């Protein structure tokens, strides 16, 4: 860490687990209880916007009631210690921002924003519950959460920023990501191919554990603050 000029951090749902936000694929993972095809696709939204919106209200409530944990704060502390830095996250919960991180590329959008299906306008949505379902844009179009659903493309500019950071960094930390969802899963491998040192922090092995330089089996909230302290 001391000799790296450019740090890229990739985070997944695991970093928010210790805050109390359920992950998707773990033991109590959301996709064990809920079917993503009914809740996180454009088809699902067209079929039943009320159900999808209620699912997002449920998750907003859950996220609003929790706090960033020591892992989020440790990443915030790393931000200013490098000449170049980018935090790439798959999370939509906004906990990194609440911990003070600023240089963030949100690959899957943000649950606290909406997007209009008609005019494309993106607006903040800070309340948990909606006044009407589905909510409407000023133009009269239907609003959807500004998040990436299954089968949808990632926001192009943010993806290129993330790819660029993975290609150019000297050190990449992959924290709490299952390495099963593309294209995020390929970022650590891209960094490796370009000569970066890649460290994974996860209590469980993942498909990239054998390929990275260091795989630290532990919880993000334990490991990251210790790394930062020793930097
Ligand atoms: P997953 O739920 O697939 O994986 C969470 C990872 O976090 C697992 O590898 C866990 O072992 C690990 N984990 C659990 N607790 C941890 C802790 N305390 N510290 C560190 N790691 C921990 O979540 P993602 O990889 O983020 O996409 O999933 C990626 C995408 O799949 C999500 O963004 C979402 C989902 O479908 C969409 O909704 C489009």
Image: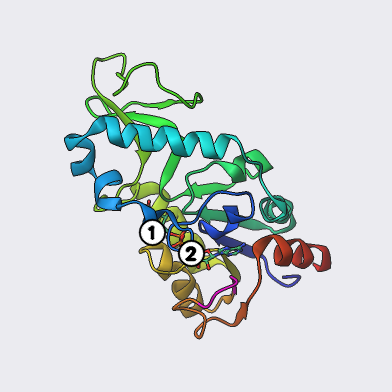
Residue at the (60%, 72%) spot, across then down: 203
The quadrant of the picture occupied by the C terminus is bottom right
Crowdedness of circle 1 by 10 Å Cα count: few (<14), some, many (20+)? few
Task: Provide residue 181's location: percent of width, then percent of height.
Answer: 37, 64
Q: In the figure, 174 relative to 44: above or below?
A: below
- Would you identify the image quadrant in which residue 196 lies? bottom right
The quadrant of the picture occupied by the N terminus is bottom right
In space, the residues marked 2 and 1 are separated at their CA atoms by 8 Å
Closer to the chain start, of discs 2 and 1, is 2
Residue 23 seen from this side: yes
- Residue bounds of the magenta highlight: 200-205
Direction from residue 207 to residue 97 in the image, left or right: right
Spot the residue most to the right.
230
Direction from residue 24 to residue 51 in the image, left or right: left
Tell me the number on the disc at residue 32: 1
Q: Residue 3: within the magenta?
A: no
Direction from residue 116 to residue 65 in the image, left or right: right
Task: Provide residue 190's location: percent of width, then percent of height.
Answer: 44, 73
Task: Provide residue 103's location: percent of width, then percent of height.
Answer: 59, 47
Q: Mark 2 points at which residue?
A: 27
Q: Are discs 2 and 1 less than 8 Å apart at CB?
A: yes
Residue 100 seen from this side: no
Direction from residue 156 to residue 76 in the image, left or right: right
Q: In the figure, 137 relative to 93: above or below?
A: above
Crowdedness of circle 2 by 10 Å Cα count: few (<14), some, many (20+)? few
């Amino acid at each position: 860490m001391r000799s790296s000029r450019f740090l890229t951090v990739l985070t997944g749902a695991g970093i928010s687990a210790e805050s109390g936000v359920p992950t998707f694929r773990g033991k109590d993972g959301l996709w064990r209880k809920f079917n993503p095809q009914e809740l996180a696709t454009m088809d699902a939204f067209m079929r039943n916007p009320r159900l999808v919106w209620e699912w997002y209200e449920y998750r907003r409530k859950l996220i609003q009631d929790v706090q960033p944990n020591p892992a989020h704060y440790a990443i915030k502390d790393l931000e200013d210690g490098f000449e170049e830095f980018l935090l790439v996250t798959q999370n939509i919960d906004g906990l990194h921002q609440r911990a003070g991180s600023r240089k963030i590329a949100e690959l899957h959008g943000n649950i606290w924003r909406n997007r209009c299906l008609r005019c494309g306008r993106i607006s903040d949505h800070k309340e948990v519950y909606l006044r009407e379902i589905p909510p409407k844009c000023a133009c009269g179009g239907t609003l959807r959460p500004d998040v990436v659903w299954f089968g949808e493309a990632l926001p192009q500019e943010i993806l290129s920023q993330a790819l660029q950071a993975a290609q150019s960094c000297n050190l990449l930390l992959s924290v709490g990501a299952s390495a099963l969802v593309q294209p995020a899963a390929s970022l650590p491998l891209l960094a490796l191919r370009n000569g970066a040192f890649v460290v994974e922090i996860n209590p469980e092995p993942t498909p990239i554990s054998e390929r990275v330089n260091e795989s630290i089996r532990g919880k993000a909230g334990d490991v990251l603050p210790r790394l930062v302290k020793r930097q």
